[in-house]
C-alpha cells in the first residue's frame, strides 16, 4: 500500500486527512500539539501523531512510514517548518507537495512586512489594540509602549499558551482565550468590548477567518493592521492536491454528494424541479430553520445552521452521503452560498440556483430587471439615495421590523420623497402583499420584516455623472469654496474608486467632499474642517444635495485625523501650515494612499514639493491651472482671469494597504 506523510495543523490539513480516510493508501498525519491531534478523526488507514519535530525527526518519520509523498499543509507563516520539511524531502528523495490557502484582498488596511514592523507602527499610534496573531509571538509585542494597558490578546484556550501569556503580563480582560472560527459579528463584539482602535492580524486567508476580521474592523470603524505573508510560495489548493493524489494512487473520488440549492421564495411553491429531485434523494437537509421548514414535505433528517463555518462542520462530520444545503432565494443573489462555497470547494459541491426575490417581484410587477440596481439593506448599510439617483429602477432587499420604513425615510430625507415605490412582503407565501405609492405616502405604513422594495425614478436617465457640479448647486457663505473647473480637475487627479475611503482636509463648503461622495457611492468621505461655521455649512449642503456618505469632522489637522480609518484617497485643500504633518498622518494609516493637494500661493507650493521629496512620494504630477471666466460687457463678452491654481498629485511608496 502506498504511504503518505501529511504535516497538518491547518484547516487545509484537516480537510485532506478527512478526504483520505477510507482510501486505499496509508496516511500518517503529524500535528504539532496534542490539541491539534484531537481535531483530526483517525480512521483505519489514518494514523495521527503529535509533537514538534526537528530535521532529524522528520527524516526518521519519512523512513519509518516509507512515505512516497510528503504533503506540507502547515500554516502559511510557519516559514522555518516549511523550509525544514522541504529540505528533509529533498535529502530522502521524497516527493514534496505544498498545500496553500488563497490570499484575500487587504484593501483599506495598513499592511506591514512582519511583527517588528507591526510593533513599530503601533508605537506611532494611540488606543487599544486587539491582537489576533496567536500566542507564539506575544513576547515581541511587549515592545509596544504601554502594552499592558493597550494590548488585548486573543489566543486559543490551551494551558501552555495561557501560561506563557500570563508570564508576559497579559492578564484579566487583556487575555481572551477563545476557540474559533469567529464570525464577523463575534469579531465586532470583541472589538467593541475592549474598545479597540486597531486590529492586528495575519493574512490567514478564507480558512483562517481573515475576511471576517477585516469586515468586523471596517464595520466598527477601526484600522486593520495586516502582517503580510513571509514569501510568495508555489503550491496548490486542497482540491488540486486531492486531484493529483487520485491520479497518482488511483484513489476514489469523495463519496459525499453535496448540493447547494436555492429554495426560491417558498420551498413548496417556488422550488425548481431539479432542486426538488435532489431533496427527494437526500439523506440530510442542512440550512436555517426558516428555510428547512419549507422542505418538510420531503420528510428528511434536518440539521439547522446559518453560519457558513457551522454548515461546513456539519458537512465534514456527517456520515450522510447525499446532502442538500438549502439557501433562501437564489444562491447567487445576496446568499450565504458566497461565503460557504470557498470553504467546501474540496468537497466538490453542485450548485442549483433558485428563483430570487428580485426575479419573482419583477415578474409580479411586470417589469424587467436587467438594467436595475440590485442592493441589499438587510443587515448592512447601503447608500440608497446614490443608487436611486443614477438608476431608473432599483430593487432593495430589506429586513427587520422597520426595514422598509427606514429606507423610505432615507429617501424622503434626501429629497427623493416623490419617487414611485412598490413594496412586496412575504412573497411566494399565502400572506403575500404588494403596496404601491410614493416614498412619502408609504413611509408611515407598517410592513412585514421580509420585504423587497422596487423604486422607480425616471429622472435618473438625466442624472449627471461627470465631475464639476455648478458652483450654484452649493449653499454659500463667506466660507472659501473650490470652484467647479478646479474641482473637476482635482477629482480627476484623485482617481477615485466606487468604494474609496476619502479624507477632505480643509473642506470649506464641502464642495469637494460632496462630489467625492457622489463618485465613491459605496465608500465614505470624512470632511475635516476647523471652522465651526464651515462645518455647519457642509451639513447643510449634505442635506441640500441629498448626499449621505459624508461625515463632518470638526477640528484641526493633523490632530483631527488620528481616530479616522485609513484613507485610500486624500485631498488637501487647506493645511493651516501643517502640510507635511498631514501627509505623514495619511501615510501612517495607509503607506500607498493617493494624495492630491491644491495651492494658490508660492509658499505652500514650495512646502508641498519639499514634503514630497522628504517623504519620498511617488508618481508626482504638477498641473498649473489657469481659468478665465466670461462676463458680459454691453454687447461684448470679456474674459476675467481667476487666480492660477497648482494641483499636485502623488502617491505613497510603501506597502499596499
Image: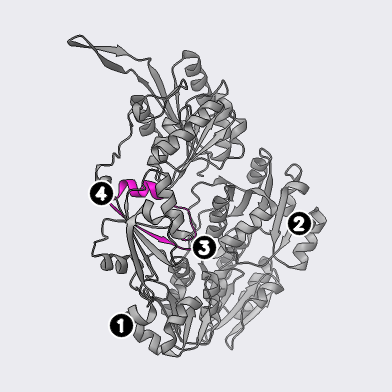
| Cα distance between the residues tagged 2 and 1 | 54 Å
| Cα distance between the residues tagged 4 and 1 | 38 Å
Please check the rendered image and state whether residue 400 is part of the magenta-colored stretch, yes or no: yes
Foreground: 630 or 85?
630
Q: Quadrant of residue 188?
A: bottom right
* Residue bearing the label numbered 4: 458
| Cα distance between the residues tagged 3 and 1 | 33 Å
From which residue to which does the magenta span run? Answer: 377-401
Labels 2 & 4 near each other (Cβ < 8 A): no
* Residue bearing the label numbered 1: 273
Rendered location of residue 431, percent (x, y):
39, 75
Query: Can see residue 505?
Result: no
* Residue bearing the label numbered 2: 173
| Cα distance between the residues tagged 3 and 2 | 28 Å
> Badge 3: few (under 14), some or many (20 or more) residues near its Cα, within 10 Å?
some
Rendered location of residue 162, percent (x, y):
77, 63
User: Residue 538 got which mark?
Assistant: none
152 lies left or right of 567: right
Labels 2 & 1 near each other (Cβ < 8 A): no
Residue found at x 46% / y 63%? 399
Amino acid at each position: 500500500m502506498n504511504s503518505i506523510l501529511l504535516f497538518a495543523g491547518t484547516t487545509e490539513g484537516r480537510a485532506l486527512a478527512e478526504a483520505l480516510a477510507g482510501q486505499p493508501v496509508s496516511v500518517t498525519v503529524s500535528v504539532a500539539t496534542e490539541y491539534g491531534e484531537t481535531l483530526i478523526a483517525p480512521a483505519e488507514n489514518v494514523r495521527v501523531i503529535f509533537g514538534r519535530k526537528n530535521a532529524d525527526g522528520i527524516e526518521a518519520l519519512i523512513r519509518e512510514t516509507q512515505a512516497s509523498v510528503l504533503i506540507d499543509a502547515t500554516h502559511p507563516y510557519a516559514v522555518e517548518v516549511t523550509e525544514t520539511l522541504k529540505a528533509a524531502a529533498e535529502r530522502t528523495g521524497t516527493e514534496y507537495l505544498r498545500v496553500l490557502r488563497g490570499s484575500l484582498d487587504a484593501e483599506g488596511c495598513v499592511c506591514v512586512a512582519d511583527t517588528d514592523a507591526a510593533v513599530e507602527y503601533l508605537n506611532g499610534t494611540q488606543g487599544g489594540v486587539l491582537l489576533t496573531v496567536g500566542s507564539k509571538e506575544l513576547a515581541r509585542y511587549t515592545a509596544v509602549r504601554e502594552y499592558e494597558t493597550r494590548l488585548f490578546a486573543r489566543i486559543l484556550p490551551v494551558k501552555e499558551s495561557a501560561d506563557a501569556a500570563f508570564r508576559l503580563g497579559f492578564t484579566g480582560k487583556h487575555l481572551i482565550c477563545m476557540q474559533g472560527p469567529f464570525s464577523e459579528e463575534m469579531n465586532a463584539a470583541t472589538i467593541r468590548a475592549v474598545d479597540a482602535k486597531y486590529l492586528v492580524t495575519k493574512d490567514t486567508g478564507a480558512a483562517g477567518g481573515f475576511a471576517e476580521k477585516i469586515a468586523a474592523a471596517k464595520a466598527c470603524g477601526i484600522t486593520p493592521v495586516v502582517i503580510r505573508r513571509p514569501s510568495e510560495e508555489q503550491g496548490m489548493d486542497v482540491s488540486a492536491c486531492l486531484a493529483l493524489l487520485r491520479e497518482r494512487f488511483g484513489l476514489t473520488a469523495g463519496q459525499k454528494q453535496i448540493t447547494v440549492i436555492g429554495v426560491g421564495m417558498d420551498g413548496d411553491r417556488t422550488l425548481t424541479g431539479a432542486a426538488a429531485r435532489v431533496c427527494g434523494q437526500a439523506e440530510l437537509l442542512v440550512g436555517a430553520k426558516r428555510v428547512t421548514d419549507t422542505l418538510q414535505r420531503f420528510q428528511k433528517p434536518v440539521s439547522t445552521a446559518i453560519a457558513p463555518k457551522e454548515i461546513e462542520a456539519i458537512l465534514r462530520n456527517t456520515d450522510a452521503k447525499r446532502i442538500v444545503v438549502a439557501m433562501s432565494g437564489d444562491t447567487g443573489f445576496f446568499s450565504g452560498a458566497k461565503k460557504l462555497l470557498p470553504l467546501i470547494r474540496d468537497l466538490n459541491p453542485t450548485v442549483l440556483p433558485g428563483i430570487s426575490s428580485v426575479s419573482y417581484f419583477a415578474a409580479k410587477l411586470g417589469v424587467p430587471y436587467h438594467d436595475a440596481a440590485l442592493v441589499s439593506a438587510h443587515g448592512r448599510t447601503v447608500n440608497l439615495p446614490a443608487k436611486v439617483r443614477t438608476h431608473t429602477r432599483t430593487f432593495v432587499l430589506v429586513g427587520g421590523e422597520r426595514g422598509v420604513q427606514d429606507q423610505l425615510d432615507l429617501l424622503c430625507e434626501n429629497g427623493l420623497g416623490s419617487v414611485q415605490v412598490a413594496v412586496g412582503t412575504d412573497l411566494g407565501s399565502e400572506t403575500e402583499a404588494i403596496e404601491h405609492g410614493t416614498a412619502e405616502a408609504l413611509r408611515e405604513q407598517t410592513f412585514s420584516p421580509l420585504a423587497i422594495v422596487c423604486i422607480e425614478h425616471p429622472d435618473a436617465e438625466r442624472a449627471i455623472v461627470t465631475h464639476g457640479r455648478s458652483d450654484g448647486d452649493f449653499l454659500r457663505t463667506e466660507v472659501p469654496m473650490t470652484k467647479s473647473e478646479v474641482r473637476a480637475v482635482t477629482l480627476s487627479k484623485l482617481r477615485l474608486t466606487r468604494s474609496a475611503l476619502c479624507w477632505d482636509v480643509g473642506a470649506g463648503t464641502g464642495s469637494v467632499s460632496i462630489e467625492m461622495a457622489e463618485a465613491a457611492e459605496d465608500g465614505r468621505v470624512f470632511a475635516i474642517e476647523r471652522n465651526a461655521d464651515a462645518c455647519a455649512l457642509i451639513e447643510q449642503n449634505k442635506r441640500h444635495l441629498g448626499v449621505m456618505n459624508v461625515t463632518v469632522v470638526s477640528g484641526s489637522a493633523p490632530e483631527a485625523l488620528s481616530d479616522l480609518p485609513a484613507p485610500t484617497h486624500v485631498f488637501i485643500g487647506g493645511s493651516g501650515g501643517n502640510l507635511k504633518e498631514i501627509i505623514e498622518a495619511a501615510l501612517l494609516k495607509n503607506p500607498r494612499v493617493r494624495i492630491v493637494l491644491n495651492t494658490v500661493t508660492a509658499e505652500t507650493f514650495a512646502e508641498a514639493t519639499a514634503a514630497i521629496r522628504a517623504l519620498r512620494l511617488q508618481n508626482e504630477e504638477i498641473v498649473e491651472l489657469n481659468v478665465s471666466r466670461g462676463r458680459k460687457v454691453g454687447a461684448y463678452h470679456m474674459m476675467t482671469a481667476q487666480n492660477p491654481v497648482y494641483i499636485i498629485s502623488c502617491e505613497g511608496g510603501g506597502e499596499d494597504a
